[in-house]
Image: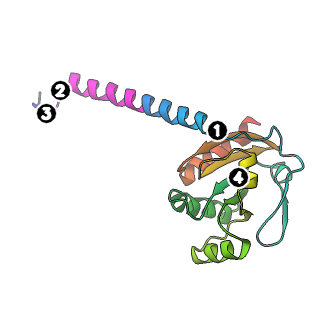
C-alpha cells in the first residue's frame, strides 16, 4: 500500500467531509429561519406597479406555475452576483418578478438597470414600505409563490440552478 493512500485515512476524511456538509447545511437552514420574512398567508389582491407602468398581480402570476419573487437593491453587494442569474431566468421565460428595495425613484432605477443590462421585470419599492410590511430585512431575498401562497423563502446568494430547482420543486409539490 502506498504511503500516501491509506483506506482508513480516506474513510476518516470522507466521514469528516460529510459531517462538515451536514453542519454547514444546518447553519444555512438556521440562518434562513432566523431571517425569514413575515410574508402574508396569501398574495391574493396584491397588485403592484412596475417601473414600466404596468400593474401585476402576484397571485395571478403564480396561478399556472410557481413565481419567483426576487427582492434586491442597487446598493446590495451580494445582489450583483444574484441579479444576473435572475435576469437570465427571466429572459429564458422563467416566471420571475423582482422588487427593488430602497433603490431610488423609477427613472433612476431604470437608468441603473439599463447600465447593468438587466431586463427582468421590476417593481420599485423606493422607501421600502412594501418590504418593511413583509419584514424583508436582508437582500437578496428569494420567495417562491405558488397559487397565490408563499411556499418557500431564502436569503443571501443563490445560484441560477438553485432558483430553477426551487421553482421546479414548488411545481411538483403543489
Which class describes the residues within 10 Å of circle 1: few (<14), some (14-19), or many (20+)? Answer: many
Q: Foreground residue, 127 or 38?
A: 127
Which class describes the residues within 10 Å of circle 3: few (<14), some (14-19), or many (20+)? Answer: few
Q: CA–CA distance between discs 3 and 1?
A: 46 Å
Residue at the far top in the pictured view: 8
Magenta range? 5-21
Mark 3 vs mark 1: which is more N-terminal? 3
Residue 1 in percent (x, y) is at 11, 27
Q: Foreground residue, 124 or 23?
A: 124
Tag shown at residue 133: none
Q: Which residue is mark 1?
A: 36
Q: Secondary structure at mark 4?
A: strand
Mark 2 vs mark 1: which is more N-terminal? 2
Mark 4 vs mark 1: which is more N-terminal? 1
Q: Is residue 12 above or below residue 94?
A: above
Q: Is residue 138 above or below residue 127?
A: above
Q: CA–CA distance between discs 4 and 2?
A: 49 Å
In this rendering, the label closer to the viewer, 4 or 3: 4
Q: Which residue is mark 3?
A: 4
Circles 4 and 2, Cβ within 8 Å, touching? The answer is no
Tag shown at residue 69: 4
Q: CA–CA distance between discs 4 and 3?
A: 50 Å
In this rendering, the label closer to the viewer, 4 or 1: 1
Residue 102 in percent (x, y) is at 66, 61
Q: In the visual, does 82 lie left or right of 20?
A: right
Q: Is residue 139 above or below residue 51?
A: above
Tag shown at residue 6: 2
Residue at x-position 61% and y-position 43%: 154
Residue at x-position 59% and y-position 48%: 138
Amino acid at each position: 500500500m502506498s504511503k500516501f493512500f491509506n483506506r482508513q485515512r480516506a474513510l476518516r476524511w470522507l466521514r469528516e467531509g460529510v459531517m462538515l456538509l451536514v453542519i454547514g447545511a444546518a447553519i444555512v437552514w438556521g440562518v434562513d429561519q432566523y431571517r425569514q420574512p413575515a410574508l402574508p398567508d396569501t398574495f391574493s389582491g396584491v397588485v403592484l406597479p412596475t417601473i414600466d407602468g404596468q400593474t401585476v398581480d402576484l397571485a395571478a402570476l403564480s396561478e399556472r406555475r410557481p413565481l419567483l419573487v426576487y427582492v434586491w437593491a442597487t446598493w446590495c453587494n451580494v445582489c450583483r452576483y444574484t441579479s444576473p442569474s435572475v435576469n437570465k431566468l427571466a429572459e429564458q421565460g422563467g416566471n420571475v418578478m423582482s422588487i427593488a428595495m430602497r433603490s431610488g425613484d423609477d427613472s433612476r432605477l431604470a437608468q441603473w438597470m439599463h447600465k447593468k443590462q438587466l431586463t427582468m421585470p421590476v417593481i420599485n419599492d423606493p422607501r421600502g414600505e412594501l418590504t418593511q410590511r413583509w419584514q424583508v430585512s436582508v437582500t437578496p431575498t428569494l420567495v417562491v409563490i405558488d397559487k397565490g401562497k408563499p411556499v418557500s423563502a431564502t436569503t443571501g446568494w443563490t445560484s441560477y440552478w438553485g432558483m430553477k430547482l426551487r421553482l421546479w420543486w414548488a411545481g411538483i409539490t403543489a
